[in-house]
Amino acid sequence: MQPRRIGITCYPTYGGSGVVATELGIELAARGHDIHFITYSQPFRLTGREANIHFHEVAVSNYPLFEHPPYDLALATRMAEVAEFYSLDLLHVHYAIPHSVSALLARQMLAVRGRHLPFITTLHGTDITLVGLDRSYLPITQFGIEQSDGVTAISSYLSDRTREAFNITSEIEVIRNFVNCDVYVRKPELVAAMRPRYAQPNERLLVHLSNFRPVKRITDVIEIFARVAQAMPARLLLIGDGPDRSIAEHLAITHGVQDRIHFLGKQDNVNELLPLADLMLLPSEMESFGLAALEAMACGVPTISTRVGGVPELIQDQGSPDQVNGLLFPVGDIESMATAAIDLLLDRTRLNTMSRAARKTAQDRFCASRIIPLYEDYYERVIARTASSTR
Ligand code: GMT
């Protein structure tokens, strides 16, 4: 693909969609594309010093009249300005609400000046499964999706769900999430140096990574861990922060395991923390994909998760031992998840086999080197299709 100038908009500070958008920008920049992040703050996984990456802050003026400052309009304005100044070929927005509608406005603002700016919307999950189905957002989300020049979804599940819930008949390209397998990898010397900070040699180390929203069921994480900690010496790394953190702290005290849990808060270098663990817990109510599980798997850490949404597209719990890369259970089945975790952690051979299968899945199917060309190919198709239709 020839080098392109691409604008990317996402939620820069919170959630998996922002992580995917940022990592995508980093990977595209490394392949020679010129990337322009148009967001309200610098995406948290960027250092600001990467080659080929530019950051354009969206500032929202707050007049006393505005009880709710119009961020979507400020964003549309900035998108149009950046697209014009830097001659962007394409805008790629992550999370439909409100980004696709802002991109649509930017496209229209430029069209009246004879400039063509196609935009692609990538659907991530709660923009469809929760927020987009709120009656007050449904029609505008549907409109934003329909008006997009291209739409991608991060799993087949999410693509199907979007079609059903929003009556979308146009094409939705499934491009699954990815991980950089060179960055997310277990480096034995790093593990040897860092693991003693969090666990003794005789202790098992579990990990959970999320934004601590109710959909993640953090209380199930604590319940499962409390049962594991009764059965063997164990510790838990909790990475992330959000509304349910204090509920988790309270439950940990109730079970007397607060001293066995490291509440680490938001962390930048999760690639250095995940490989320290033996097992990840992700007992979510819903996951359209489960990026945290993929990042752990790339580090050789298998996941116990729930059989929801797009998770079975990533975690395979049936087949020969070298195919099984994690375990899936019904939502809320704490007892089964705890029993499975205990059995697995006590069986070193099975745990190692599953760890290798997890890494192999990440490498064979979800490495950035495999997925990024799918985005590049899709960009070219959208640019070509929309250029010929506007001629
Ligand atoms: O729920 C989150 O963790 C945040 C949310 C988002 O859109 O920012 O995550 C969704 O997108 C992630 C990245 O594509 C997926 O890995 C998550 O499964 C998905 N979350 C849900 O569907 C609940």
Image: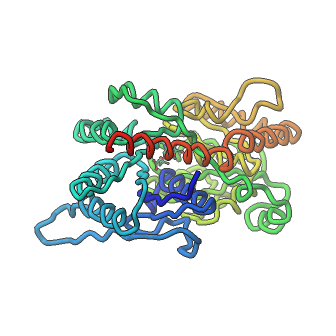
Frontmost residue, 313 versus 106: 106
Left or right of 345 on screen, residue 165: left
Quadrant assignment, res 364: top right
Residue at far bottom of view: 49
Left or right of 374 on screen, residue 170: left
* Residue 234 in view in this figure: no
In the rendered image, the vertical position of residue 157 relative to residue 177, given as above or below: above
Quadrant containing the C terminus in the rendered view: top left
Looking at the picture, how far across and down is residue 197, in whole percent? 75, 68
Residue drawn 64% across the image and 36% down it: 314
Frontmost residue, 287 versus 386: 386
* Residue 279 in view in this figure: yes
Frontmost residue, 180 versus 372: 372
In the rendered image, the vertical position of residue 337 relative to residue 383, given as above or below: above
Quadrant assignment, res 374: top right
Left or right of 197 on screen, residue 209: left
Residue at far left of view: 65
Looking at the picture, how far across and down is residue 54, in whole percent? 48, 70
Frontmost residue, 80 versus 303: 80
Residue drawn 85% across the image and 60% down it: 188
Looking at the picture, how far across and down is residue 59, in whole percent? 30, 71
Residue at far front of view: 391
Residue drawn 46% across the image and 69% down it: 42
Looking at the picture, how far across and down is residue 226, in whole percent? 65, 46
Left or right of 334 on screen, residue 95: left
